[in-house]
Image: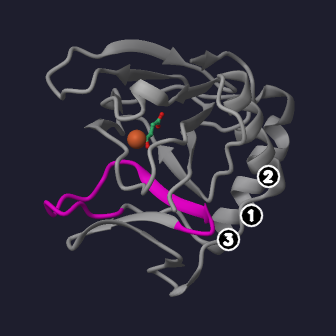
Amino acid sequence: MLLRGFAKPIESELIADIGAIAAQAPFRHMVTPGGHSMSVAMTNCGRIGWVTDPGGYRYDANDPESAKPWPAMPPSFCRLAAQAAVAAGFASFMPDACLINRYAPGARMSLHQDKDELDFAAPIVSVSLGLPAIFLFGGLKRSDKPRRFRLEHGDIAVWGGPARLAFHGVAPLADGEHAQLGRQRINLTFRRAR
Ligand code: SIN
Ligand code: FE2
């Protein structure tokens, strides 16, 4: 489900919170198990964070760069994610992980499934901020042709239930200038990982 403009009323709070998180746990380009540096820069907040390195994908309570716990999830994040889940028909979503993705022009995310979580009953709640992006949303097989959705600042996408393991990705970000965030797109992906 696409909730257009759902995050807009608290955009300033979200942007300030992202700045505070990035000051503690800076955005970095993680390396995939295949040895490629990702074009998207990432950080996390919450009890656990998603990381990738040459050893594989996993959730880790600590930031591997600092060996300290990830910054706590701000209450504004948690509330927004739970409200968006309810609006999409998923009651009592309590995320314990929030992956924060930063896209510069040209950055992309290839088709993948979010499947490092223990329980697929909880949905994925994905908040878009900054420059618009083309979100690719496919089926349960990698070969299913993805649909394309333009996600703009403040939009929230929620997928779960039979679509929980749908392949999804982001097309290379077009250059532009966003009033609040400049030449970038930031995405918050909320999950119940444990
Ligand atoms: C993701 O799948 O983790 C990111 C999706 C997005 O940036 O919209
Ligand atoms: Fe994903």
Question: Residue 166, how many percent across, how many down?
Answer: 34, 29
- The overriding secondary structure of the stretch rendered in magenta is loop
**Which marked residue is nearer to the observer: mark 1 or mark 3?**
3
Magenta residues (range)? 30-48
Question: Residue 117, how many percent across, how many down?
Answer: 42, 55
Give yes or no for contact between labels 1 and 3 (Cβ–Cβ under 8 Å): yes
* Image quarter of the N terminus: top right
| Viewer-closest of 92 and 42 | 92
In the displayed structure, would residue 163 be above or below residue 114?
Answer: above
| SS state under label 3 | loop
Three-letter code for the amino acid on which mark 1 is drawn = Ala
Give yes or no for contact between labels 2 and 1 (Cβ–Cβ under 8 Å): yes
Q: Answer whether residue 183 is visible to the viewer in this image.
A: no
Three-letter code for the amino acid on which mark 3 is drawn = Pro
| SS state under label 1 | helix
Residue annotated with mark 3: 71
Question: Residue 49, how many percent across, how many down?
Answer: 51, 65
Could you say which disc has been placed on residue 101 in the image? Answer: none
In the image: residue 82, left or right of residue 95: right
Picture residue at 73% right of the left edge, 19% below the top: 5
Picture residue at 15% right of the left edge, 64% below the top: 35
Could you say which disc has been placed on residue 20 in the image? Answer: 1
Give the image quarter of residue 31.
bottom left
Q: CA distance from mark 1 to mark 3?
A: 9 Å
Picture residue at 64% right of the left edge, 52% below the top: 95
Mark 3 or mark 2: name the one nearer the start of the chain.
2
